[in-house]
Amino acid sequence: MAVDNETVKKIALLAKLRVDNEKLDDTKSEFNKILNWVEELGEVNTDNIEPLSSVNDEALTLRKDIVTAGHISLDILKNAPEQEFGYFVVPKVVE
Amino acid sequence: MTDLTELTVADALSKLKEKEISPVELTQAYIQKLDNNKKYNAFVTLVAEQALKNAYIAEQNYLNKVNRPLEGIPVGIKDLFCTKGIKTTACSHILDGFIPQYESTVTQNLLDDGALFLGKLNMDEFAMGGSNETSYYGPVVNPWSKDKPLVAGGSSGGSAAAVAAKMCAAATASDTGGSIREPAAFCGVTGIKPTYGRCSRYGIIAFASSLDQAGPICKDVTDCAILLNSMAGYDPKDSTSSKRDVPDFSSFIGQDIKGLKIGIPEEYRPEGLNPEVASCWDKAIQILKECGAEIVHINLPHTKYALPTYYVIAPAEASSNLARYDGIRYGLRVEGNNLDNLYINTRTAGFGAEVKRRILIGTYVLSAGYYDAYYLKAQKVRRLIKNDFDNAFQNCDVILTPTSPVEPFAIGDTKMLENPINMYLNDVFTVSVNLAGLPAMSLPIGLSQNGLPLGMQLIGRAFDEGTIFKTAYQLERGANFVRI
Amino acid sequence: MSEYIIETEKGKWEIVCGLEIHCQIISKSKIFSGAPAEFGDDANENVSFVDAAMPGMLPTLNEECVHQAIKTGLGLNAVINKYSVFSRKNYFYADSPQGYQITQFEYPIVGEGKITIDLSDGTSKDIRIERLHIEQDAAKSIHDLNPTKSFIDFNRCGVGLMEIVTKPDFRSPEEVGAFLRKLRSILRYLGTCDGNMDEGSMRCDASISVRPLGSSELRQRAEVKNVNSVKFAMQAIESEAHRQVDIYESGGTILQQTCRFDPSTGGTKFLRFKEFSDDYRYFPEPDLPPLILSDELINKIKDELIELPDAKKSRFVNDLGLTPYDASVICENKEVADFFEKVACGRDAKKVANWLMGDFFAMLKKRNLDISQSPVSPENLGKLVDLISHEVISGKIAKDVFEIMAETSENPEKIVEEKGLKQVTDTSAIEAIIDAVIASNPDNVASYRAGKVNLLGWFVGQVIKQSQGKANPALVNKLLKEKL
Ligand SMILES: [Mg+2]
Ligand SMILES: [Zn+2]
């Protein structure tokens, strides 16, 4: 499954990255090299094999419904590039 | 004793307890070394003043006999661990100036045990890399470099180099596909990646959540046991951390390994394996035999597929984990005329080439129409890889392999740069362990003809770090590797 | 079942509609963090490092949110899945600090179920539930503080949500309205969500398509987002269906799109077409192992489940003799049903229902009060009913007493006593009045005696009027007959 420049652009858009036009061909060919390589996995027979997303075999532990955090807005905002009135600030979002 | 930085953690602790040395002296010695060894670029942030302050406190604690297990031990912290009030960037431009207001559990455990931090260690950006060349702050130089600067390995290159060059007594590190073991091998030091779930991931900047594990890089096996004792343990703040009891890893040091079955996987000795690496492996086998261990040949048939599997799963998780770096709440922000452009400008400027490459691959393999062919397929092969180990451990107690197929190479090596896959291939012996969640240690065994360290890897059953420690200690004794 | 058909000169059309309803879970803390699950506080006050997606932060699942989802699932007569999995839904948006939402995808906690709705023509219909899953709510953006900027508050971010998805079973706006009211009633009974659509704690998205009547095809649908009242939901469906019919009849096609309901026009407003950016790249959340529920837990919650509106309604009909209509009105709100049961205990339930649905509801409505704020307590209302059935006061006097009760919250017995409103059952006193009435109306007496017996009612009225309503009507009747 070789990707084309259009796909690279779309994927970059999904990932909120910009690939400059002059770098598009290089990025695409690198992309295809890696994809070709990982496509070796196609050789492996995985019929009836359950996917493994985590090696963890312990049941998920649930947290008691107790308030243990909050009221640290200064800490939350401490690293904000832009803030005002206790809010994080972004360019106007229109919906 | 003239140079206190020569001491292992174990030796330093006993001398501190005996009041032969003081925490302040010890800390000052390391700060001096840090100063002398700036050329290695191992540290990206120093907190020497704070370290000295804490050394005075440690000194009081010794005097008042309320000293804790690591009281006054100066350690370095990989820049992936969030440290309260200390800049933490994962060596990425996108986390410029980020100062966490919280402490990672692993570093908190060390603080609670009395360790003191000298600063933050260089690493590959977001732990993505095998040579520490993707750091926004430049590559780490391997202290073993001769005529030209060599890589320290990655991603925990700063941790390994700092320990090797005695710029800290021990260091924290993390390992997603070999990031503790490979740099440890390259720098002639010892590092262990414990079983997935042993150390809490809370406060460690995530690369690939299902693979990431913290562990120590130390001067020797005994120190690794001491450090891991402090770092490991169940943490309710990490839902993937294990509730299994943590044994005293130090208790395995010195245990004999008579009759222990050492597995040697056939697939790790391909045709073209570097003969120096192969002979180092033979040397290690010989040492273990002499200790009374039994060598058994095992098979890990899906080894060949571990790297492609890893390079689907790790980028997929990373593409999602790194979505939070968007210029809104912390770190770098490059303005844009709307929110979308702010995101794109920030992320395009803030991430380095390797990180962007992996985000793109990861985004692709998860996207509609490709998920089954790549991501789901990789997860299935991942199970087969884990099954391989389960089967192998029916016949052996611990597995011995080389850590890396190569010795440290030059910074800026053209072969590594021309194709990212060439760099990825260096992880061929380490990634399977992460996919299977197993514990594994790398320790130095000998030197190549170029006089560069070669490391061997011991892989254990899940939650059986103990067997690794006792085997590694015997191996270490037999190898008698001389640190720089 | 009432049929809802859109009829034009060109043909007859049928609506096909399904709903997705987001319900905020009632819990103290957020679903994946220990921050308070309330908003209304100052901006970013109820936010933890986890909610703000700080580097290295990890989710931990709130037990209460899981219990609430199970409870709700049981209330929807649905299958509870003992194995469910959290997934990441990846998208960039200012209100999504992680760059993904933790939700459930392939394996939701609750599977198929149904809700029975009652329609105005007396029929009822089952609406099938496809699933219920739990997930985290998004932050809130404020757009009106600055002309070029939006302000983000993470207080709501991470509050637990239950997303309930129905099958496309709705064929009319009325069905949608009945369903939303019924669902809200169930959620409120269970105490799992407060169901306030205007405050956004219950938010409805509708997918709407139309098809020629009699066909079974499923045509392209449009999604109407975030409708915030039952009335608006009904309007939105109606207007969107008409819009689609117009397009089809003028030869056009419907494209997959998202719309918004505009209350000012009563119509739907186009927002956007389905985009490439809607590729959410779901994959299993590596920070949370699968959620496994035990039979014990499910059974325990089942055993503790309170009686739900449907069960209560049939009990009121079968055991207390209410009409199905009265029973369903009383059961829609649990507080009303509880109030009713307190009053009805040991009394004639039908009479109580009449009082409740008549004067009592009218009083609450007039005073704009919730039943919990009622000035008339169930005990006092019960006493009033008793005063009538024990013939201490007449029904007419009772209305006046009730007025006073509503004003003063007084005990009706006391009011009757103090104001001297007791029925006069003293024969001699009534006889005196009767005599006076007979004496002053000779013409009518003559007519009555001549055979105009229906004048008796007039005489009764006169006597009661002169007694200021206090004379017992039955007694007056009996005595009048004797005297006349
Ligand atoms: Mg949905
Ligand atoms: Zn949802």
Image (cartoon, coloured by chain):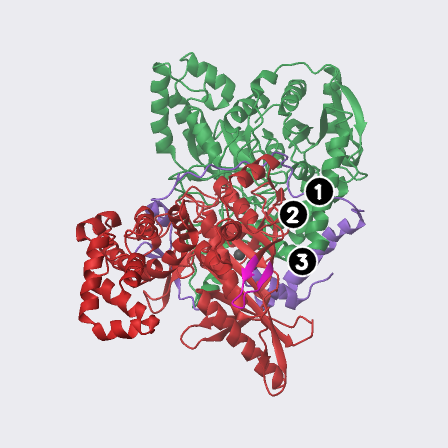
Chain colours: A purple, B green, C red
Q: Are marks 1 and 2 in contact (CB under 8 Å)?
A: yes
- Residue that mark 2 sits on: B313
Percent across and percent down for residue B447 are 67, 29
- Is tag 1's residue or tag 2's residue first in the polypeptide sequence? 2
Q: Which of marks 3 and 2 is in front?
A: 2
Nearer the observer: mark 1 or 3; the answer is 1
The residue identified by callout 3 is A30
Same chain assignment for discs 1 and 2: yes
Residue C15 is one of the magenta-drawn residues: no
User: Which secondary structure lies at badge 3?
Assistant: helix
Q: Where is residue C215 in the image (x, y as percent from the top left)?
A: 69, 74
Q: What residue type is labelled 2?
A: Ile
User: Which type of secondary structure does the marked residue at label 1 adopt?
Assistant: helix
Q: Residues in magenta?
A: C116-127
* Residue A1, picture quadrant: bottom right
Badge 3 density bin: few <14, some 14–19, many ≥20, Cα 10 Å: some
Q: Residue B391 carries which label?
A: none
Residue found 76% across the figure and 35% down from its top = B388
Residue located beneath label 1 in the image = B382
- Image coordinates of residue B245 in percent, x first then y, are 57, 24
C170 or B151: nearer the viewer: C170
Residue B297: give x, y in percent of width and height: 81, 27
Quarter of the figure that contains the N terminus of chain C: bottom right
Count of numbered tags: 3
